[in-house]
Image: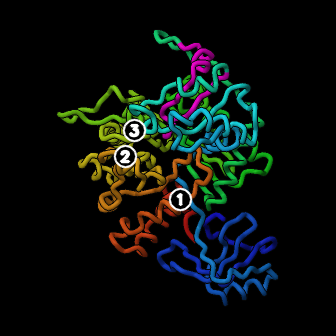
């Protein structure tokens, strides 16, 4: 259910809920007992059992007894990949993150047989995901796939989707040339299947309590499918689509095509689709063996060799002047500093421009924390699954989500799952592991703060706080 309180004159098709524990994310009245939901899925009235039962009786509203169940506004997931997740979970081989050189091929073979839809990618097999640390010398090699798949192309996504493992046949089909590598001539998706997979992904998001999200790798296929779902009345999720700028591999679309989409993106706006957002990737991820995050050198210089989008300052200024929020992927000290520099430059030209975001925030230098609040930058912290993951603990502080320091800086914080290929995108289990940290030892306080981060703070980040985020 969406989080809002809207005026309600027509009580037809509304539903009243009583005897609940309603956490409203509203400082003036944080707890309530009952509420009424409008036909459009909004909180229209929130209050005591007596007040809501009176209205229900007066207007003959169907009433549900919650029997002391907990209710809160819908979750805003600040970072999801709906199309990627839907495709992986319905049409690819999901093999988990623990596959080794001994069993990766057999896991793919078993997983490909379990797909809900087969032959989506013609004779190609797409799988997710692998972790280099599970392989000899920390390097996954195509030879581990070739024995079982000598003639069929196989592509396995890396754990953070910033690398791929291809078998020999896939490399041949791609026309791989070490001197002059051309674009891949790979499998094509039908529009109908893109719609199917989005419906599947949105259904899983709803099960996780998500009513609003920021889609972090939006392309033409996704926006076209969302438009069709909207026309058919099948889109029940509020989606802020972040169209990718410049990074063809992230969007699975050419730069020229993405630029055309950015120029025409307003045509895709609808009731549930907000297109005022852009995604820029600055670096990779701090995962071995490649370590593609952009750090800082001995004298504080950004490692430019790891920077993906070199014209970030020009791009941020351009989209800032168009009124678009830019979400910038950064995982290293260097990339985060470069993002701040770009946003600061835009603020000098346009001081009242839109709020921008740094995505992930796992690599913030000591001097970076003080820059969030003055420049109106959202700290979108993700992926939630890795906040206390063994991979994070083994990263030698290359991945460091420092909530206490971020809170002390006054940064506006949102939470994202960075949902990829896992079956459940729920944020709650990951949040449970950090409530004490966020609350400075007070779990109740930490829980309240986190609930605000993935409800009202998320709504503020996308400019929807009048309609979403609280009761």
Element under disc 2? loop
In this rendering, would 104 be left or right of 62?
Answer: left
For mark 1, what is the residue?
Answer: 427
| Circle nearer the viewer, 1 or 3 | 3
Q: Distance of mark 3 from mark 2, alpha carbons?
A: 36 Å
User: Could you tell me residue 30's position as x and y percent?
Assistant: 51, 78
Q: Earlier in the sequence, mark 3 or mark 2?
A: 3
In this rendering, would 268 be left or right of 157?
Answer: right
Q: Which of marks 1 and 3 is nearer the N terminus?
A: 3
In this rendering, would 87 be left or right of 464?
Answer: right
For mark 2, what is the residue?
Answer: 351
Q: Give the number of marks.
A: 3
Q: Distance of mark 2 from mark 1, alpha carbons?
A: 34 Å
For mark 3, what is the residue?
Answer: 287
Q: What stretch is highlighted in magenta?
A: 152-176
Q: Could you tell me which residue is drawn at 62 percent across and 62 percent down?
A: 209
Q: Could you tell me which residue is drawn at 50 percent across and 40 percent down?
A: 159
């Amino acid at each position: 259910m969406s989080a809002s309180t809207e005026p309600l004159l027509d009580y037809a098709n509304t539903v009243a809920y009583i005897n609940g524990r309603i956490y409203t994310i509203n400082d003036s009245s944080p707890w309530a007992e009952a509420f009424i939901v409008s036909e459009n899925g909004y909180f229209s009235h929130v209050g005591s059992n007596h007040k809501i039962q009176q209205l229900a009786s007066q207007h003959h509203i169907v009433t549900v007894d919650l029997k002391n169940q907990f209710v809160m506004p819908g979750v805003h997931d600040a970072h999801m990949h709906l199309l990627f997740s839907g495709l992986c979970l319905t049409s690819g081989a999901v093999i988990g993150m623990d596959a080794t050189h001994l069993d990766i091929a057999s896991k793919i073979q078993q997983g490909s047989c379990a797909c809900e839809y087969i032959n989506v990618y013609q004779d190609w097999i797409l799988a997710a995901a692998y972790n280099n640390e599970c392989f000899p010398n920390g390097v996954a090699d195509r030879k581990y796939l070739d024995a079982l798949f000598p003639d069929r192309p196989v592509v396995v996504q890396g754990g953070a989707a910033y690398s791929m493992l291809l078998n020999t046949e896939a490399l041949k089909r791609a026309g791989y040339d070490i001197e002059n590598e051309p674009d891949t001539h790979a499998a094509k998706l039908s529009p109908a299947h893109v719609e199917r997979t989005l419906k599947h992904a949105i259904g899983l998001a709803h099960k996780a309590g998500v009513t609003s999200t920021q889609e972090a790798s939006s392309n033409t296929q996704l926006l076209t499918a969302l438009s069709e779902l909207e026309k058919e009345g099948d889109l029940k999720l509020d989606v802020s689509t972040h169209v990718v700028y410049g990074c063809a591999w992230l969007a699975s679309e050419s730069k020229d095509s993405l630029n055309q989409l950015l120029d025409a993106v307003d045509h895709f706006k609808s009731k549930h689709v907000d297109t005022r957002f852009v995604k820029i990737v600055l670096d990779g991820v701090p995962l071995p063996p490649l370590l593609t995050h952009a750090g800082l050198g001995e004298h504080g210089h950004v490692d430019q060799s790891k920077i993906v989008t070199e014209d970030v300052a020009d791009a941020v200024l351009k989209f800032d002047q168009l009124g678009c929020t830019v979400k910038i992927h950064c995982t290293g000290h260097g990339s985060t500093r470069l993002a701040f520099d770009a946003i600061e430059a835009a603020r000098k030209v346009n001081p009242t421009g839109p709020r921008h975001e740094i995505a992930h925030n796992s690599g913030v230098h000591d001097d970076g924390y003080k820059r969030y609040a003055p420049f109106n930058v959202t700290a979108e912290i993700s992926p939630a699954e890795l906040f206390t993951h063994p991979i994070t603990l083994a990263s030698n502080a290359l991945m460091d989500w420092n909530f206490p320091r971020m809170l002390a800086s006054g940064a506006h914080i949102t939470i994202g799952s960075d949902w990829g290929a896992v079956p459940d995108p729920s944020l709650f289990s990951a949040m449970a592991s950090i409530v004490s940290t966020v609350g400075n030892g007070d779990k109740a306080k930490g829980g309240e703060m986190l609930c605000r981060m993935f409800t009202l703070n998320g709504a503020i980040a996308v400019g929807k706080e009048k309609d979403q985020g609280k009761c």
